Amino acid sequence: MNAGDVVPARLGVVSRGRAAAAPAALAVTLGVAAASWVVAVRQMSGMDMGVATQLGSFGFFVALWALMMAAMMLPGAIPAVLRRAHASRQVRAVPLFVGSYLAVWTLVGLAVFALYRPHGTVAAGVVAIAAGGYELTPLKQRCRQRCRESVGSGLEFGLYCVGSSVGLMLILVGLSVMSVAWMAIIAVLVVAQKLLPHQAALDVPLALAIIGLGVLIIVAPSTIPGLMPAM
């Protein structure tokens, strides 16, 4: 092979490496998310007590929270994971990116464990109203935009995505942190906001609906299934 053939050959190797890394990264990410859903749902079984839900021991909750975040957040992170795999041309760069991303969400779980207490429906309603209001703030929109762009590391990506999704996660914590139904609803909203562009025609009604949900929880909590433990 002469010198003129070296560069095209290397470019071919790089191109094949990138082409192989993306499907592998996609399969691994979706596989981890699916497995996390299965395990998290099993572990949460029987723990949903609405606003009176207990978190369990520190170790149990942190491990379960990490599984919940993997289940809920990884599908929406797929574009960023694919960009990381494409840029690095190696699948082994993906676990570090995903691990540091989930580590940020695990730190959020530590804060939840430290601050959470079983509470009443008024507190749950106030949390939902605050979450809906946050959806309309410039900070939310800025973090959402950055969460959709190329970032330097899983840590940076995680910080922006926490800023984007923290309001939605507050709804889960406020209404029932161990509710599979609310977990699924919030996961759909998180993924939609990560993958769909910002559109006021969609985002404003969602924020107002969340605020309306908070008001309904305060004035008529019995209309929200599962909000209060069965007597």
Image: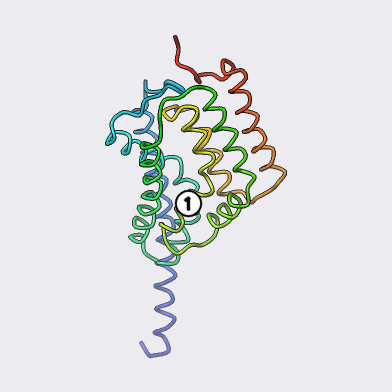
Q: Which residue: 46% across, 22% down?
A: 50
Q: Residue at x 37, y 23 (%)?
A: 47
Tag 1, which secondary structure?
A: helix
Question: What is the quadrant of residue 204 in the picture?
Answer: top right
Which is nearer the eye, 68 or 15? 68
Work out which quarter of the rendered image holds the N terminus and state it: bottom left
- Residue 13, x across and y down, in percent: 39, 73
Q: Which colour scheme is used?
A: rainbow
Q: Nearer the viewer, residue 55 or 115?
A: 115
| The C terminus lies in quadrant | top left
Above or below residue 231? Residue 120 is below
183 relative position to 216: left or right: left
Which residue type does callout 1 highlight?
Ile
Seen from the viewer's position, the closer of residues 207 and 43 is: 207
Q: In this view, does 15 lie to the left or right of 212?
A: left
When the figure is inspected, residue 28 is found, relative to residue 129, above or below; the finding is below
Query: Label 1: few (<14), some or many (≥20) within 10 Å?
Result: many
Question: What residue would you read off at disc 1?
Answer: 78
Image location of residue 214, percent across then percent down: 60, 28
Residue lying at 50% horizontally and 21% vertically, measured from the top left: 227
Is residue 19 visible in the rendered image? The answer is: no
Image point (40%, 61%), residue name: 20
Kindly tell me whether residue 218 is visible in this rendering. Answer: yes
Q: Nearer the viewer, residue 115 or 1?
A: 115
Residue that lies at the very extreme toward the top in this rendered image: 231
Residue 83 lies, in percent from the top left, at 48, 61
Q: Residue furthest right?
A: 201
Q: Position of residue 211 (x, y in %)?
A: 63, 33
